[in-house]
Amino acid sequence: MTALRTADEIVAAGLAPEARRGELDAVAARYAVAIPDAMLRLIDPTDPDDPIARQFIPDGRELVTTPEERADPIGDLSHSPVEGIVHRYPDRVLLKAVHVCPVYCRFCFRREMVGPQGLGMLSAEALDAAIGYIAAHSEIWEVLLTGGDPLILSPRRLGEMMARLADIPHVKVVRFHTRVPVVEPERIDAALIAALKASGKTTYLAVHANHPRELTAEARAACARMVDAGVALISQTVLLKGVNDDPDVLAELMQAFVELRIRPYYLHHPDLAPGTSHFRVSIAEGQALVAGLRGRISGLAQPTYILDIPGGHGKAVIEAASITATGDGCYSVRDFRGNEHRYPPAVAE
């Protein structure tokens, strides 16, 4: 795989004018850049509002940090008992074995930790300590491999990690979070798929995609290979201004997931990462978009709209309530058209 990583390469590819070279250089000096071939082919350089370009081409606004933004917006570090582990919830941990990615999203909430200038890969000693922590805590039922993107590791490395987790009897589920099926689908071959599985463990894989155009024929085939091999797929999407904050785009994306046998899972409200304010919609706007999906598309295609509470306090569902108490032992329930109904219905005299 080749990827554009510098301002010179982006300008030479016709994805930005010469006048923006200095801006691109400044952003690339601060945050990692990589735009792989699969995403390059999707960008329309004649469209200044192209939703694919917006996700991956550096923007000078990334250098503007607003007061509420923070380097560790979801509080990973405050829940990290050993290097590479985040233990926020009782029954599951994050295992961050690697902090590099095949593509760098301009809205990444771990942008201060990933990339060539980031935390790199866990050393053998640190990985031993992380696996040891998981083995020592019998309450851990699920391990989430994230980072960085765990699927940039070789099948051999992934297989070795899964074999070590297979030896821990209380771990029952292993979940991978990745962009690879979308941005580098050719990596999803028989060897990699085999490495994702281990005896006695159930494997889930969260596919991160934010716009239906990302689900190319190659990405769809990669997802099909995994599902056919017994890997359960779920989706992960970030609600982004100028990318998918549109009811038609969001509906098309969620329906595409279902068609691909990917269960729509989380729709993330964008985190307060540094230099990402131009991507953020308001919570009220997000609630309206999600409410608009109800009744419009199948229940199979409904994601859960969530916010990671800053400071490490975990996720909260932030969809607008469709039911409120009326104070007389009854409720008012809002349907998908916005009409209110009494529950239970009034009894005719």
Image (tube, rainbow, N blue to C red):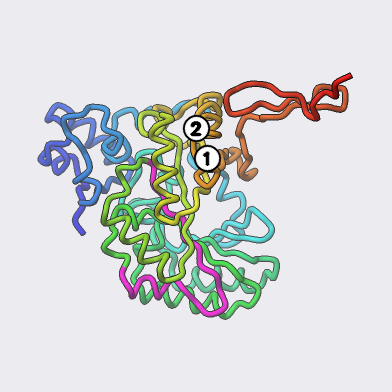
Q: Residue at x 17, y 34 (%)?
A: 45
Q: Residues within 10 Å of mark 2 (few under 14, many from 20)?
A: some
Counting from the top left corner in percent of width and height, residue 26 is at 26, 35
Q: Which of 227 and 243 is in front in this view?
A: 227
Q: Give the range drawn in magenta.
A: 189-210
Asked which quadrant contains residue 322, the reply is: top right
Whether 331 is drawn above or below 169: the answer is: above
**Residue drawn 42% across the image and 76% down it:** 159
Residue kind at label 1, given as amino acid type: Pro
Q: Is residue 285 left or right of residue 78?
A: left
Question: Mark 2 and mark 1: span between their CA atoms?
Answer: 7 Å
Number of numbered tags placed on the structure image: 2
Label pair 2/1, CB-CB below 8 angstroms: yes
Quick check: 347 left or right of 100?
right
**Residue 198 shown in magenta:** yes
- Amino acid under disc 2: Glu
Tell me which corner region of the image, top left, top right, bottom left or bottom right, holds residue 19: top left
214 inside magenta stretch = no
**Residue 335 vs residue 203: left or right?**
right
Q: Which numbered circle lies on residue 69?
A: 2
Which residue in the structure is indicated by mark 1? 73
The answer to whether residue 84 is seen in the rendering is no
What is the crowding at mark 1: few (fewer than 14 residues within 10 Å), some, or many (at least 20)?
A: many
